[in-house]
Amino acid sequence: MSTTLIAGTPHSHPLYEEIQDEITRGLADRKWKPGDLIPSETELAKRFGVSKGTIRRALDELVSDRILVRRQGRGTFVATHSPDRTLYHFFHLIGRDGTKEPPAAELLSYRVIRGSDEACDRLEVETDSKLVSVRNLVRLAGDPIFIDEILIPQAYVPGLTEAIYVNRESTIYALYQGRFDISVIRISEQLSAGPVPAEYAKPLGLRTNTPVLVIDRVAFTYHDKPVELRRSWVNTESYVYHSDLWKG
Amino acid sequence: MSTTLIAGTPHSHPLYEEIQDEITRGLADRKWKPGDLIPSETELAKRFGVSKGTIRRALDELVSDRILVRRQGRGTFVATHSPDRTLYHFFHLIGRDGTKEPPAAELLSYRVIRGSDEACDRLEVETDSKLVSVRNLVRLAGDPIFIDEILIPQAYVPGLTEAIYVNRESTIYALYQGRFDISVIRISEQLSAGPVPAEYAKPLGLRTNTPVLVIDRVAFTYHDKPVELRRSWVNTESYVYHSDLWKG
DNA sequence: TTCGATTTGTTCGTATGTATT
DNA sequence: TAATACATACGAACAAATCGA
C-alpha cells in the first residue's frame, strides 16, 4: 500500500522484508529491549496492515538468526545473552574429546588507551578515539588456556570501570547488553597460527615460541555495526576451536 | 486429516517434517541425483496429499541447508558441488586483506592403506578397512599455502585411481558426487596450532617448527554419515581461516 | 517477438491444534 | 475454564521468472 512503485525501479523488496526491517529498527532503537515481549503476531498484523502469515514470515529469519525467540503460548521475545547462549553460540573452544567447559576469566589489565589507526578503522570510529582495553587470562577446568585482549570504544560503555567489569555477573556480552544496551548478535573471526607472544608464554605455561592459535574477532550489533575487537591466543594442546558447517 | 491421531500419543512429528524426511530419503537413495529437477510443488502436493504450503514448508529447510536449490520459473533442483559452492561454502581460507583465491592442488602421493583404529572409528567403517590416502600441496595465487592429507574408505570410491584423481575437473567433492554418487552436504572442523611437520616445512617454504594452523575435518553426506577425513597444515602468514557467526 | 503454459515467490484468509497463564 | 499466543495446515489468488511454440 505505502510501497510506492516508481516506473523503472522494480522496488524489489517484498512486504515481509520491509516489516523485518521495521522490527530490526525497533530493536536497534531499543524500542524493544532484550528479554522484552514484542507485540503478538495478531497485534503486529493489525499494526502493519498485513496478514498474520506475512508477519510470521518476517519473524522467521529473525528467529533463525537467534535475534528473537518464539515461545508457544507465551509470545515472541527479544533474545538475551543468557550464559548458555553466549557459551554455546559465541564460544567455540571444546576439549579434544568433545567436552565443554565454562570459561573463567582472570583480569590481567584494564586501561583506557588511544586506539591505533587500524583498530579505530575496524571499529568504524574516529581516529585516536578512546578505547577501553581489557586483558584476561582465561581458564577452562582450572587450567590457563588462553589470553584475551578486548578493545571497545569508551563511548559505547560510558561509566564502565574496572570494578564494574570485574564484578559483573555472567559474560561480557551480557554486561554490554544489560548495562549499556549493546546487543552483540553476530561475530566474525579470523584464525591463524603464530608463536606465543613473549609476555604470554609464562601465564599460559608454555615455552617460548610455542605455536598458539590466534583468533581475531569483530563483534557486531544490529545493522552490522562493529562494537568490539578481540584477539585471543589459545593453547591448543587440550582444547580446539570447533567449527560446524553446516548448520548451526 | 489423514494424520491418524491416536489418543495419548500426541503424534509428535508435524506433516512437513515427515515429508522432509521422505524427500531426504529420496536424495540419500539417489532417486533424485545432484542437478536433477525434483517434482514441482504442485506435483509433490498431489503425490503426498497435502497442500502446497506444507510442501513449501518441507522444502524450506532443505533449501536453507543448501541441499536443494529453488529457481523461480524453472523448478527445484538437487544442489551440486559447482566450483563456487565448494569454494565459498566449504573453503574458508581468505587473504589477510579479504581476497579470495581459487586453490590449485599438486599431488604429492596417492596410496591405498589400512586405516588406523582412530580413522576407521571416525569414518564409522570396520577396523583395518582399506582407505585411499591422498596428499596434496595446495597453492593460492601461485604460492604454496597448505598441505592436505585426505582419507576416504576405498569402498566408497570403487575404481578410483591416481589417474582419475589427478585428471579430475573441478574439486574433489565434485568428483565424489559426479563419479561415486557421494554428496558431501556438511563438514565439521577442529582447528588447532602446532609446529609444521618436519617433512612439510620445505614444500611450504617454512623453517622448522614454524607455527601452522592444523585443520581436522570430517565430511558428511545425508543422514550425517561420515565419508571423508582430511587434515590440513596451513601457513597463515598471508592467508587466514575465516569463520562468520552468525550467519552463513 | 509475442504469447501461453509452467513453476516458484508473495500475500491473503481461515481453521484447528497445542502450550501458557 | 477461558483467553491468549504461537504452530500447523489448508486453499486461493496473483506476481514474476522461464521456456518453448
Image: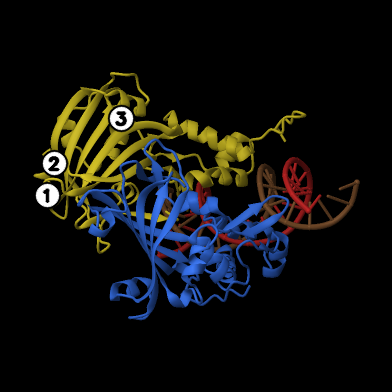
Chain colours: A blue, B yellow, C red, D brown
Going from N to C along the chain, the mark reached first, 2 or 1, is 2
**Is B135 situated left or right of A20 in this image?**
left
Residue at 48% in and 72% down: A161
Task: Give the CA distance from mark 3 to mark 1.
Answer: 37 Å
Vertical order, A226 against B196 (above or below): below
- Which residue type does callout 2 highlight? Tyr
Is disc 3 placed on a helix, strand or loop?
helix
Q: Is the residue at mark 2 from the same chain as the one at mark 1?
A: yes
**Neighbourhood count class around disc 2 (C-alpha, 10 Å): few under 14, some 14–19, many 20 upward:** some
Q: Name the residue under label 1.
A: B206
Residue at 15% in and 46% down: B209
Which part of the image, by quadrant, shows the N terminus of chain B?
top right
**Is C10 situated left or right of A87 in this image?**
right
| Nearer to us: label 3 or label 2 | 2
User: Residue D12 location, x and y as percent?
Assistant: 68, 52
- Which residue type does callout 1 highlight? Leu
**Neighbourhood count class around disc 3 (C-alpha, 10 Å): few under 14, some 14–19, many 20 upward:** some
- Residue A78's disc is none
Task: Give the CA distance from mark 2 to mark 1.
Answer: 8 Å
Q: Name the residue under label 2.
A: B200
Report the chain holding disc 1. Answer: B
Closer to the camera in the image, B144 or A233: A233
Q: Quadrant of residue B228?
A: top left
Going from N to C along the chain, the mark reached first, 3 or 2, is 3
